Amino acid sequence: LLLSGSSDFYPVPGDLMTQVHFLGSFLKDTRGHQDRVKVHLYSERHMHAKHMSIDSVFSYIGSFNYDLYSARRNLEVGVAVFDRRFAGDLQALHQKRVEEARATTLRDWVYNQPVVQLVCAVTYFTIRLSGRNFFDGLDCFQRKWLVRKGALT
């Protein structure tokens, strides 16, 4: 996995705090598979685009966040391409970013500090709650989206 190690939310990076909680669980669940599962955080700049290449022939790149909130409320864009050369170029770009990123493991301090874990867990579950039906009907046209934005920042 290659994830953004920087945030575009200020002054409190709620997205990174939820990421810490998720990654702590993910890294624990994949313990023993470090030869096949590696997580890298790219901090040069925030990465919003999501991409994947499958079997060196199918590629996808887009902005969709793969969560309920984005599926129900956000206008997202993505492009799927069946082309070996495009898939190869995307894989090469991915590998370049991995080499520029830092690996994160359960030995990192952020996964071993109880106060940090608690704050990140509260943030994670607050964000999860904001994506549930409880907030249905909040849309950017009525400016009620500020409730969710306020929870993130």
Image (cartoon, grey):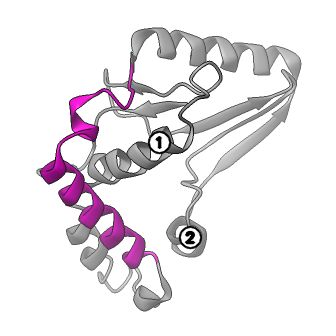
Q: Is residue 16 above or below residue 31?
A: below
User: Foreground mark, 1 or 2?
Assistant: 1
Q: Left or right of 22: which side holds 65?
A: right
In magenta segment, residue 125: yes
How far from the left and from the top, in percent, is residue 132? Answer: 47, 81
Amino acid bearing label 2: Leu
In magenta segment, residue 100: no
Q: Is residue 29 above or below residue 129?
A: above
Provide the major secondary structure of the magenta segment. helix
Q: Nearer the viewer, residue 85 or 102?
A: 102
Q: Nearer the viewer, residue 152 or 25?
A: 25
Q: Which residue is mark 1?
A: 28
User: In this rendering, does residue 42 appear at all?
Assistant: yes
Crowding around mark 2 (Cα neighbors within 10 Å: few <14, some 14 to 19, many 20+) is some
Question: Is disc 2 placed on a helix, strand or loop?
Answer: helix
Please report the bounds of the magenta region as a residue range.
103-131
User: In this rendering, does residue 140 appear at all?
Assistant: no
How far from the left and from the top, in percent, is residue 73? Answer: 52, 74
The residue positioned 53% from the left and 34% from the top of the image is: 31
Q: Left or right of 3: which side holds 33?
A: right
Q: Which mark is residue 80?
A: none
Q: CA distance from mark 1 to mark 2?
A: 24 Å
Give residue 121's quadrant in the image: bottom left
The residue positioned 17% from the left and 43% from the top of the image is: 113
Give residue 88's quadrant in the image: top right
Q: Which mark is residue 68?
A: 2
The residue positioned 47% from the left and 8% from the top of the image is: 99
Question: Is disc 1 placed on a helix, strand or loop?
Answer: helix
